[in-house]
Image: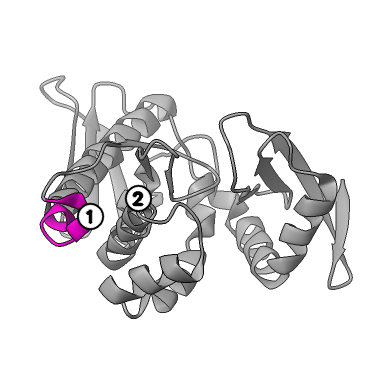
Amino acid sequence: MQLELSGRAVPLVIQRNKRRRRRVGISFDPDGHVRIDAPPRTSLREIEEIVRSHERWILRNIDKALVSGARMASSLTSGDLISVGGLQRMLVVSRAPDAVASVSYADDVVMLRTPTPDNPAVVTSMLCRWWQDRAQAQFAQLMSEYATVLPWLSGCEPTWRQRFMRSQWGSCSASGRISLNSHLAKLPDSLVRYVVLHELCHLVHLNHSRRYYALLERYLPNWTEHRRALDDYAAVLLEPVA
């Protein structure tokens, strides 16, 4: 399916997802395709209306995905720049002298040591686990902090998990289970905090109504700035996942 947006033919790949109940997910491929992840009963007309309502945002992120296509390879190797906390860092891969694999971060360099430094798949897999570990620690800290601040949590952390996702930074199910994207470890701390709070507010309002945004603004008055800043990292969702 194709839609014309601002005189530009945009190819859409529509996927029906039984796990989605309400919201439509939008992601971008390095080749310029826009992927639509929609609940089973969403009509093509509804999808078109959603796409057109986000026209400027979609066109901007298509261009970013195309420009970033060169670094969207299926694997990572020594010398590549990788994202850590919103900054680009140099990846240096070397052979582990003691045959013990490890990843460390110091002096703006991510040092990865492995018995098989010439195997890109191993390097990528190790980095993904490293990002997951960083994300796990960051999410756990924020959940603990918000549990003492947000009254509807009553001092208890909600059920949550992390996983790599291609279409969204986070989600909250009807049962109250929160999912957070492991890719968030690559973003600035302020944006990670925004995404976590965004999903926690859905425990009160499972929608994007005025009441929802009023609640979000009560705890993060400048949330619109964070949402706009988050758009700049859309290409990160397409980065390698082992």
The total of numbered circles placed on residues is 2
Residue drawn at (50%, 56%) of the image: 207
Name the spot of residue 164 as percent of width and height, x first: 42, 37
Q: Chief secondary structure of the magenta span? A: helix
Name the spot of residue 202 as percent of width and height, x first: 39, 54
Name the spot of residue 224 as percent of width and height, x first: 44, 76
For the question of whether residue 242 can be seen, the reply is yes
Residue 35's image quarter? top right
Residue drawn at (36%, 25%) of the image: 122
Name the spot of residue 209 as percent of width and height, x first: 51, 65
Using the image as rendered, state which of residue 143 and residue 149 is in the foreground: 149
- For the residues marked 2 and 1, what is the alpha-carbon distance in whole angstroms? 8 Å
Quadrant placement of the C terminus? top left
Residue that badge 2 annotates? 203
Using the image as rendered, state which of residue 67 and residue 241 is in the foreground: 241
Q: Amino acid at mark 1?
A: Trp
| Residue 119 placement, left or right of 90 | right
Residue 140 within the segment the image draws in magenta: no
Asked whether the beta carbons under mark 2 and mark 1 sit within 8 Å of each other, the answer is yes
Start and end of the magenta stretch?
Answer: 145-154
Q: Amino acid at mark 2?
A: Leu
Q: Earlier in the sequence, mark 2 or mark 1?
A: 1
Residue 191's image quarter? bottom left
Residue drawn at (23%, 47%) of the image: 139
Residue that badge 1 annotates? 152
